[in-house]
Image (cartoon, rainbow, N blue to C red):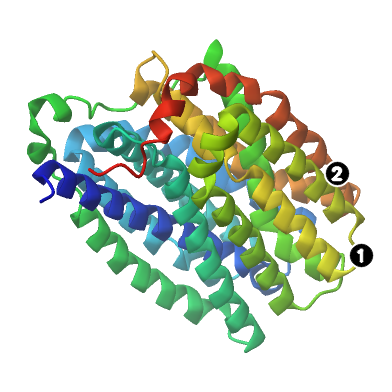
Amino acid sequence: MRSERGRRGSRDRIAISLIFAVHGTVAGTYAARLPWIADHVHATPGVLGAAMITPTIGALLGMPLTGHLVHRFGGRSALRLLMLLWTASLAIPALMPDIGWLAAGLFVYGANAGVADVMMNAEAVRIEKRAGKSIMSALHGMWSVGGIVAGLFGALCAGAGISAVPEFLVTALILTVAAFLATGLLPADAELGAAAAEEIRPPRFALPTGKLLGIGIVGFCAVFAEGAGSNWSAVYLTSVTHASAAIGAYCVTGFAATMALGRLSGDAIVRRLGPVWTVRVGGTLAVLGAVAVVAARSPWLGIVGFAALGLGIATGVPLAIAATGRTDQDADSAVAGITSVMYASGLLAGPSIGALGSAVSLPFAFGFVAVLSTGIGLSAYTLRVGLDGATNQLADVRSPA
């Protein structure tokens, strides 16, 4: 029979996997219907990109509040509160009547996104430590699975001519219930025991320095490319290749699908190639995918390019976070700092692509993504710092609990 610890560990992994999937579904739902939102508020790419600055500001201002919430409510209750706020905030973008209100609504949306993301990654690191095996790549794979589900549903709604308002309201309600149930599967702080509960400290937010700086570069470049692809792939296909809104939404799904494939298979690939070469090869594929997007003047080449970009960046983020959690620095502080930098990168991607697209063109903007993606492969060697000692541990992922 399995031990109580083994059952508890399995329950924790199921819970945190569902939480990552819910978070990804919210983000994917918004991204898939971004063309509808832009048309609804009559925004050009440049104006829409400017509005996307507000979620960046909201996230950066909201992230420091995470520690206070953990201290006030405890780990599980804080995560539940943040996830419920995040799922409920999905309704905001579709309800805004003009670009001004959209910018204000995205400020709240971004703040909820940031604090929920930091908290769930910090919880994932704690669960990974208690499990004694690598789970981060699979968790981020579940985030991408959520994006796939959202993209498919968004494509069906767009194809049927359904506006984003009923879609977002129904989806927000379903995901709020799912987040409530998933967080309930996590152990309360008192169940962890005094030693484990002591690990739950308010995260401190400090910019990465020293050996964490290189890891931060990998994450920054990967998340920027991810934000560009997820937020702008549908817009790119509809405006540059003249694809339909439904095809644009399917492209978001394909982008999320390749990321999910790369992340769900990430542990097996790392066992063969090691973390450095896994990310190095992925970075090369990401550059090639971005170049294909730049060259695309037909929807299908654009879809292939975005799919390759998604596959290439898939393991960069989870392996960077895992490496950070295994350094000799305080784990909560290091992960909070890395996560903050990476999340800010993803949120900056939206307005940056919009500004470049408006000033020059969207193909030029994705040329910048191609250049930035080279940083993933060039900085991959820094992941050896945190993962050298854990490579053998990855081989034991399928060992009995």
* Residue under pointer 1: 297
158 displayed left or right of 127:
right
* Residue ID at (46%, 52%): 108
- The kind of residue tagged 2 is Gly
Q: Is residue 159 above or below residue 258?
A: below
Q: CA distance from mark 2 to mark 1?
A: 14 Å
In the rendered structure, find residue 181 and report the number of the disc placed on it.
none
Q: Quadrant of the C terminus?
A: top left
Q: Is residue 112 above or below residue 178?
A: above
- Residue 185: x %, y % from top left: 19, 55
Looking at the image, is mark 2 or mark 1 earlier in the sequence? 1
Find numbered disc 2 in the image and state the secondary structure of the residue it sits on: helix
- Residue 362: x %, y % from top left: 84, 54
* Residue under pointer 2: 367
Instruction: Tell me the crowding category of disc 1: few under 14, some 14 to 19, or many 20 or more residues within 10 angstroms, Cα based.
Output: some
- The kind of residue tagged 1 is Arg
The reply to whether residue 340 is in sight is no
Which of the 4 image quadrants contains residue 125? top left
- Residue 240: x %, y % from top left: 87, 64
